[in-house]
Amino acid sequence: MIPASDYDSAEKKCLPYWNVFFDTLLEFIPCDCENILELASGTGFLTEILAAEFPDLDITCLDINRDYIEFARRKENLSGVKFITGDMREFVSHIKYDAILISQALTFLNAHDRLKLAGNIYHMLNDGGTFIAGDIFSPESLFERDLYKKLWITFMVKNGFSPEEASDMVAPLDDYCQGNTVSSFEEILNSAGFSRVIVPYRREYYGIVIAYK
């Protein structure tokens, strides 16, 4: 696991076109959104972008890693954010949210936990609420997987990683994804009750899925 002090810089070195990815996530936050729950918020890398873009938004962050939560809590520009240490797989809030956001965490869940999480998220959203998920998804074909891995390794080597380090980071991707493709996740969201599901962003292993209650 990446130490909290290194996580923010690692995001920019490891995630291709990270700024486009995160900007797209924020693009789908409803203009009338008053409160948002960010799951698996980590060290607050995305939270900082979110707070700067929507300064009046009531933001709650949840992450299972206490070190990450404490690191984020110490950031001055996140002083107005509520932080909770907890497991998103078990978290169910009595508060309803206009939007729920998650980034780069679904890939570490198995199919059962993804289905359970989708159901919990559905029930924590206000009617008309939006679920915004940006994550690593398994490509549909072996050809795509091999090609995208090579491109990802090349990207990280350009950012200072050795070829061995980059290869080691990319090697377990398929084990993490556990067959979780964009289309299979769409099916999970539909079965959880979401009325509309769209995929506005797809680049290699990364995708953004938006679900509307």
Image (cartoon, rainbow, N blue to C red):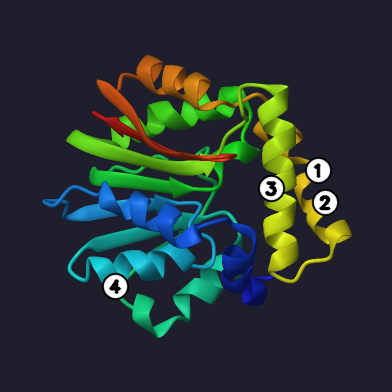
Q: Residue at x 58, y 39 (%)?
A: 204
Q: Which residue is mark 3?
A: 151
Q: Are marks 1 and 2 in contact (CB under 8 Å)?
A: yes
Q: Is residue 50 left or right of residue 44?
A: left
Percent from the top left, x then y, of residue 160?
74, 71
Q: CA distance from mark 4 to mark 1?
A: 35 Å
Q: CA distance from mark 1 to mark 3?
A: 13 Å
Q: Choose mark 3 or mark 2, whichever is in front.
A: 3
Q: Which residue is mark 1?
A: 171
Does residue 143 appear in the picture of this structure? Answer: yes
Q: Is residue 96 above or below residue 158?
A: above
Of the numbered discs 4 and 2, the one sitting upstream in the chain is: 4
Q: Choose mark 4 or mark 3, whichever is in front.
A: 3
Q: CA distance from mark 3 to mark 2?
A: 11 Å
Of the numbered discs 4 and 3, the one sitting upstream in the chain is: 4
Give neighbour class at mark 1: few <14, some 14-19, many 20+ (Cα, 10 Å): few
Identity, as a three-letter code, of the amino acid under mark 2: Ser
**Residue at far right of view:** 164
Q: Is residue 138 left or right of residue 207?
A: right
Q: Which residue is mark 4?
A: 52
Of the numbered discs 4 and 1, the one sitting upstream in the chain is: 4
Of the numbered discs 1 and 3, the one sitting upstream in the chain is: 3
Q: Which residue is mark 2?
A: 167
Q: Residue at x 33, y 64 (%)?
A: 50
Percent from the top left, x then y, of residue 45?
48, 67
What secondary structure is found at the residue carrying circle 1? loop
Percent from the top left, x then y, of residue 192?
37, 20
Q: Residue at x 59, y 26 (%)?
A: 180
